[in-house]
Structures are given as structure tokens and as C-alpha cells.
Amino acid sequence: VAMAAFVGWWAVAAGLRFPGEISYGVEYSSLPSKGLEAWEAVPGWGKAQMLLFIGFLEWGDEYFHSAKGEHYLRGGTPGKNMVPGLFDPFGLSKNKSEEALARGRDVELKNGRLAMIGFMGLWAEAAIEGSVPLQPPC
């Protein structure tokens, strides 16, 4: 989620937009290019859909961890996605060794943590200009 948020913030700031409308009468191209301003321009139901979708993904992962294996907080494998079809839907990692899979999970966790820091840096700079040294206004 943090990686998607960071890339989404960057993409909006870079001027990338989907074609069409985000809502009736609201074009993607009409969204401002600054992160918090773009979020504020999204209609309330659009925000609700995004948050519900993210919540559904998180809930699904927790549910499948509890139902199909040992939860990572109770000794299970951290970073292992248990939702069927969500991770590696094309089976690209099926022939990898357990060591390679463990390394991949470790890398993914570290990238996710870095994205959390990056997103919070963008948010902090947008909320309080000058709060993040060497970062231009976003």
C-alpha cells in the first residue's frame, strides 16, 4: 500500500493522469498536481472506495494467514502473502528455492518500509512546507 501511495503521489506530481473521469463531471486531468490537493479534489465516494479496497486487501491477507497457515505474529513467515492469486499470479517464482523466496520476501519488506518513510516525507513536506530538508515543495 505504501509503495502504491508513493508511486501514485509521484505520478500525479509528474503530471501523469488516467484518461476519462474519476467521477461524473470530474476529469482525471482536472486533478491538481500536488499530492494533498489532488486527494482533496477526489470526491468523497472515491476516497471511500480507495480506502475500502485497501482495507479489503489487508483484511483478506489477515484472514488467509489465520485460515491457511500460521499467522506471522504467531510464528508464521513474515512477508508471505496468503491471498490466492494476489502475489505471483503467473507462477514466476514457483521454481525458486526456499532461500531465494525468503530473500525476496525480505527485500519486499524492506522496500515497503522505505516506501512508508518516503510517503511520510512527502506528506510532511506537503503539510508543513520546509519540514523535510532538501525536498522541494510537493
Image (cartoon, rainbow, N blue to C red):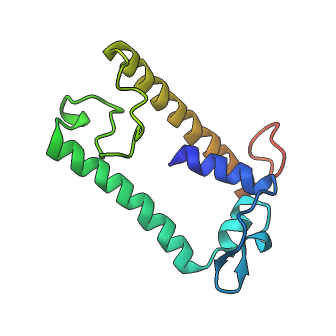
Residue at point 71%, 73% (across, down): 20
Left-right relation of 104 to 118: left
Furthest residue in direction bottom, as rendered: 25
Residue 34 vs residue 91, the one in the foreground = 91
Residue 15 locus on image (x, y percent): 81, 57
Residue 117 vs residue 6, the one in the foreground = 6
Relative to residue 96, is residue 49 depicted above or below? below
* Residue 109 found in image quarter: top left
Residue 55 locus on image (x, y percent): 39, 60
Residue at point 70%, 64% (across, down): 18
Residue at point 80%, 61% (across, down): 33
**Does the rendering let one see residue 138?**
no
Left-right relation of 93 to 129: left
Relative to residue 107, is residue 50 depicted above or below? below
**Does the rendering let one see residue 17?**
yes
Residue at point 49%, 24% (across, down): 107
Residue 99 locus on image (x, y percent): 35, 13
- Count every numbered label the image shows and give the total: 0
Left-right relation of 4 to 79: right
* Residue 34 found in image quarter: bottom right
* Residue 114 found in image quarter: top right
Relative to residue 9, is residue 94 depicted above or below? above
Residue 35 locus on image (x, y percent): 71, 59
